[in-house]
Amino acid sequence: MFNHLREDIAVVFERDPAARTHWEVLTTYPGVHALIIHRFSHWLWGARLRWLARLASHIGRGLTGIEIHPGATIGRRVFIDHGMGVVVGETAVIGDDCTLYHGVTLGGTSWNKGKRHPTLENGVVIGAGAKVLGPITVGAHAKIGSNAVVVKDIPADATAVGIPARILDQEKVKQRDDMAQKIGFSAYAVSEDMNDPMTKAIHALLDHAAEQDKRLQEMAQQIANLGGDAETEQQVGKAFDVEHLNKLVD
């Protein structure tokens, strides 16, 4: 019990730069309190004292804003940051060294008995507001983006974002970022550290298309000035109104 508590406190210092003292962590961090209460309620659940287990869990929910069913299995060095609104279902399994941010739900999609909640392997990080639903598995060291909705298995070391969540190809993400840097696009109303690289890439492609359209129009004008038959269609540029299209994908 005390070994678990020492690990819970130590992991806060590893993953939360706001932590200052051990006393502060022990007395003011709801994620730590929720795990302490869960270990007690889980022990009661295993001893078949189900009502007492649920009562302890209910009290923990009221004190911390974190609802963990006493039947859930949680590993070591798990960090629940802030924690308000976190819900962990009865058959959920959370491996060692996982991190959950506020608003995360490990929920079910069925009323059937048996395994109906997710399994998180070691080292998984779930962003704020994400929903991981059903008896699926999130592989070791995978990352789930904020507000993502995950309903299918996620392989180890992958990153998933969006609704429904899609897996990002890390190599392609790097290539798209490199291309964005190369063509020097202006991402309208999009910060450089935006969480979704796919949206970033779409903005880059739109700006690139607009630049190509502009060059084609200039070439057509030059050909016309030389007496050629090329048409200088004035409406071509409007087909790639970057500001309008950027708003469509924002």
Image (cartoon, helix red, strand yellow):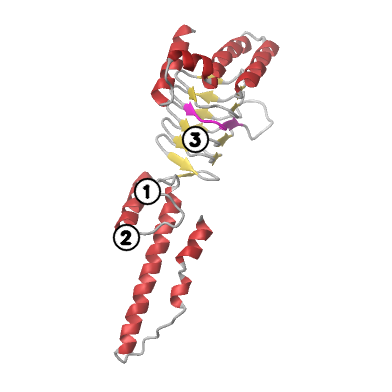
**What is the number of the mark on residue 183?**
2
Question: CB under 8 Å between callouts 3 and 2?
Answer: no
Relative to residue 23, is residue 149 depicted above or below?
below
Residue type marked 1: Val
Q: Earlier in the sequence, mark 3 or mark 2?
A: 3
Relative to residue 11, is residue 131 depicted above or below?
below
Q: Residues within 10 Å of mark 3 (few under 14, many from 20)?
A: many
- Seen in the image, is 49 located left or right of residue 151? right
- Seen in the image, is 62 located left or right of residue 179? right
Quote the CA–CA distance across marks 3 and 2: 31 Å
Q: Secondary structure at mark 1?
A: helix
**What is the number of the mark on residue 127?**
3
> x and y percent of residue 129 in the render?
55, 36
According to the picture, the residue beneath numbered tag 1 turns out to be 173
Is residue 115 inside the magenta stretch? Answer: no
Q: Secondary structure at mark 2?
A: helix
Q: Residue furthest bottom?
A: 227
Q: Earlier in the sequence, mark 3 or mark 1?
A: 3
> x and y percent of residue 38 in the render?
58, 16
Residue extent of the magenta highlight: 99-107
- Seen in the image, is 47 located left or right of residue 19? right
Residue type marked 3: Gly
